[in-house]
Structure formats: structure tokens, C-alpha cells
Amino acid sequence: SVAGGAPDHRHIGAPDRRHGRRRFRLCAGLTAKTLKQLGQGRPASSLMFAKFSPDGARVAYVSEHNLYVEDLAAASLRPLTTDGTISLINGTFDWVYEEELECRDGFRWSPDGQAIAYWQLDAAKTRNYLMLNTTDQLYPFTVPVEYPVVGEDPSNCRVGVVSAQGGATTWMKVPGDAVQHYIPRMEWAANSTELIIQQLNRRQNESKLLLCAARTGEVKPIYAETDKAWIDAKAEAVGWDWVEKGQRFVWLSEKDGWRHMYAVGRDGQEKLLTKGNYDVISMQMVDEKNGVIYFTASPDNATQTYLDKVALKGGKAERVTPQALAGTHGYDISPNGQVALHTYSSASTAPVADVVSLPAHKRLSDGETPAGSRNLKPFKPEFFQVKTVDGVTMDGWLVKPTNFDPAKKYPIVFYVYGEPASQTVVDRFGTGRNRLYTGSMADDGYLYVSVEGRGAPAPKGREWRKAIYHNIGQLNIRDQAMAAKEVLKRPYVDTSRVAVWGWSGGGSSTLNLLFQYPQIYKTGISIAAVDNQLNYDNIYQERYMGLLPDDKKYFVEGSPLNYAQNLRGNLLLVHGTGDDNVHYNNAEQMINALVKHNKTFQLMAYPNRSHSISEGEGTSRHLATTYTKFLKEHCPPGGR
């Protein structure tokens, strides 16, 4: 079991979640009512991802880039690796694996508790990006961040198995250049003698599943697929869904144009479990005893999410979520498949959490609304679809002014993201809210809208999602602009007062829209944007845009930096100088380009703030005040 409790139910770990990682210090003995500190003699706050052995007698964890096993009864500590350094990482990952492949916990106990399989990354050749801290000391100093940009090689990655008693590591003989491939997923293969590994090539358009002999490291490829665009890593970073006593596992693939579930055998033979023109959003639970698999989907509305089930032998899917509960649903299903923690909300319904039976979906507890949502009023956006001149049908939402008068014309503000990492048009509570606006946009007389084009991770099929390949900054921008043109035809929209804003990828989209379609967008607020795609990390940007040098033109043509000379409207550029995700040099390069072309704009740089621009007293309030003031000045509110 991961971190929290031992399988024998005699112990429980107490985590310290600082720095976004699981750091453990205490272990409680439930039967003896004792409390023991783990890692005696190890540096404070250095323990990460502590996990009990299957018998609950030992705990394994990472400390200062090495793996350790601690015997609880004997109070003995044994290092399993000793070569770990800041650049040779055992049992966890470098920055870019964490950020883009969701890899954090980098080791696995064998089911029999006799061995541990782990990742080792050699980041010695990864260059540091030096962020400059100019405020925390009298003399500025640099803050190094291990960061491989587009075109730079990833870390050398390998997987090994070591005895829980210590000794030499057996390295898996994974084929191919260890630098030009990624290993995003690894688990024990339903036994204690084999591992199963997912390997992606550098372009991330070839995925292979490998069975590896833990004792010898010998590797047997069992399953492979390719895609003209990219293939995602297995969605869940931890776990593997085995059935039939470990003879098969359930796997998601888009190979037929839709994301479907397949049963794959150890010999690589596959069987399609779900079929039809719809996407499996996520796999939730395999209930082998009752012969069903639970998963989420929404065949009829890409803005919503529901629970479905299908027979383990395959067949027609059946909806489990009651038809009356329209919106977005989440489930945490018990191991026996009988009950689930259920969360539900919609744009007009506050979040509710309850316990339901499965498959009947009968409520077993009173519904509770999280404290933070109890006093919030829904914004009740109107959901709509718009068809562009290119024949693309896009989902959107619109929040109208409080005292809307159809005879008047109102300013309109578009909220945009536009990249494969996130959706903006989702039927859940909070949709339509602008957390950066001080006051109420509706009360002040704004139209607030978002439309979602191709490339967004919506359940609309492979072609929808992957049309953006080689096209970030091009196709997604045209989709947004053409949808905006249709929205602006509404008689109550003032086309002279059109604003757009976004954060991160949405900041990039904002700049591209403002620069590429200045006849539509008059005002833009861009926050923490990737202004030059060549500045961003290799795993994310190469996945969607290709590799250098062959595909360089796509990176350049999709970057806002390439269009800075076209600025005609009002621009507020916002960035944190301590952003370790989208570095401040993006903003500085954009500033230089705008200055070169004599384009006036406003800049708000936040010293040492990260990508969230949230650190420091008053920061969030100041950002919201700055945002609101700029918007009101350059896109005045109210009907006319």
C-alpha cells in the first residue's frame, strides 16, 4: 500500500507534504499505541515517499537521492543505494519527469516484499537554468533549476531491481538508447519475478510494453503501437490493472480513433472491451468478482463526465450515474466494487460529496458540500455550440450581465487556454468565475465567455485532440478566432470592446490572438506565457511539436514572439521572475521584440514569484487589482 497505511493494519505513516512531495517522519503502531520517528540520523525533511513493505514490518523511502529500508522492530536502517547525488537520482525523478510525465514516487516493493524495483535518472548532462534572485539578499544570487529545453537531451533513465536486504542492483536490459527514450511507467507484473514497463521514444509517438525478468534483467516486448502525432503515457502513474490472475491487463488506446479499453495478454494478444464512437475518459476500477469494469465517459456531451460500466468480457457499455444528475461526476470506488465516494457538481449546482452503492448508485450517506463552496453562488453560464467557417463545432459558455438588456451592446471578455493540458469548457461548479476580477463581471456589465477548440483534451475523439500536432499557436488560435467571429455576430456584443486573457498556455494563446487577429481582439492580458516555444521543456513541447532540427519551423511559427510586430491593441504582460516552469526569459524576449518594433504595452513583473504568482504578502490581491484596473481602463464595462 502506498505510504499511508501498512497492509497488516498495524501501522500508519504520518506525512509531511512540504515542497509538493510526500515526506515522512513518523510511524504509529496501532496495536501497541506507539509512535516511532523514521529516518533517525537522516537529515530533517529529507524522507520522501515512505512505503510499508507488504508484511508491514519495514518501511522503504528515499533520502537525499538514495533508497533506504528501515526495519521497524529492529530499528535498523539499511541503504539500498549509495551512489545518489543531486544529478544521479534513485527512487524519484528530475524536474521534467515530474512536471510532464507525473512521475514522483520512483520505487515499488515486490509483492513478496523481498525486492524493490526503482528508477534511476542520470541528469549529469542536463543544464541548469539559472534564475536570478535579486531581493532576498543584499547581493543577487542565482537559483539553479535542472531544466532541459526543447532540443536538449533528456536524462538517461533506467530501471533496476535490488534485494530489500541490500546488494547489487540488476538493471533491466531495456532496448534502445536510454537517453532517446522515456520510461514513464513501471510496476511489478502481478508477481514477484517480473516487471512491466512502458517505454516511449523521444518523439513520444511509439509506445512499447516490456516484460522484464527481475532476476536477470532480460526483456520481452509484448505490445507496441504508433501514432502519427503522439501517444500519452499510461494515465495512472501508479498501479496496473491486472485480471485473470495476472494473465491479462486492461489498457487504454486510441488506435481506432477513440480512446477505448483493451484486455491485453502477456503474449500481447488484445481484445477490445469498449466499442463505439465515444471516448473512455478514465478507467476507474476493475471489479473482477462481478465481471465488470467501471469507467468514466460522456458520449453525448463533451463538457460532462459520468460513470459507466462494461462487462469484463467486452460488450455494450451501460451508464451507472443517474440520468437526472447532469454535470461532472467523480468516483473513488472501494476495492470490492460495492461502494464509492462520489462527488458531483455542475455549473449551476454546488459540489456535493456522498457515498453511493454500486452498481445501483443509491445514496448511503447524506450529501455534503465542501465548506469552501457553501456560500458561493453559481455563475450559471449558458452553454452553447458554435460552428466556425472551417466547419469546426466548438463548445462554449457565456455569462451575461446581471441586468442584461438585449437592446444594448456589451463588452466581451474571452477566457482562453487552448493547449492539450487542460479544458476550459466543463460543466462543473465554478465555471464562469473569473478569480482575477475584483467584484462581479456580470454586475459590472461584461459578457464573459470561453470557447474550446481542437487540441483540448475533451472526449471528442483522437482526431479532435491530435489535430494540434505541429500546430500549437496556429490551428488552436484560428479555431479561437473563428469561433469569436461567430460569437461577435450576436447583436448585443460590442465589437469595439473585445478582450482576451489567459494564464500559462492561455497566456501564449492570448498573445497569439492579439497579434495574429488584431482586427478581432482589442485588449489582452497575458500571464506567465510561453512566448517562445523553444524556451519550454523538451518532454511537453516536443510531444506536440516534434524534434529539432527537422521540426523547428513549427516551434517558431507557433510562438507569439514571431508575431510581436503585429500588436495594435492594449497589452498587459504579467510574469513572475522566479517562475521555474515558464521562465522569465520568455517575458524578456517578448519585451525586446515589442521594443524593437516600437510597440507600447504594460508590464507587471513579480520578483521571485513562481508560475502561480501567489507567494508573498499581498501578491494575489495585487495581481487581481492590476488585472481588473487594466481591463476596466481598456475594455470599459457596461451596456451602451
Image: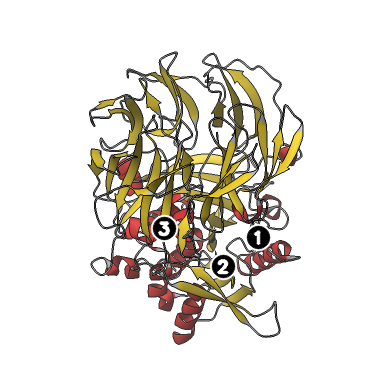
Tag 3: amino acid: Leu
Check disc 1: other Cα within 10 Å, few if <14, some if 14-19, many if 20+. many
Tag 1: amino acid: Pro
Residue 121: image tag? 3
Position in image of residue 137 (x %, y %): 70, 80
Closer mark to the observer between disc 1 and disc 2: 2
Position in image of residue 157 (x %, y %): 37, 56
Closer mark to the observer between disc 1 and disc 3: 3
Q: Earlier in the sequence, mark 3 or mark 2?
A: 3
Q: Is residue 326 left or right of residue 257?
A: right
For marks 3 and 2, give the CA distance: 24 Å
For marks 1 and 3, give the CA distance: 53 Å
- Against 3, residue 334 (above or below) is above
Report if the CB atoms under discs 1 and 2 are less than 8 Å apart: no
Would you name the residue on which mark 2 appears? 579
Q: Residue at x 53, y 56 (%)?
A: 414
For marks 1 and 2, give the CA distance: 32 Å
Q: Earlier in the sequence, mark 1 or mark 2?
A: 2
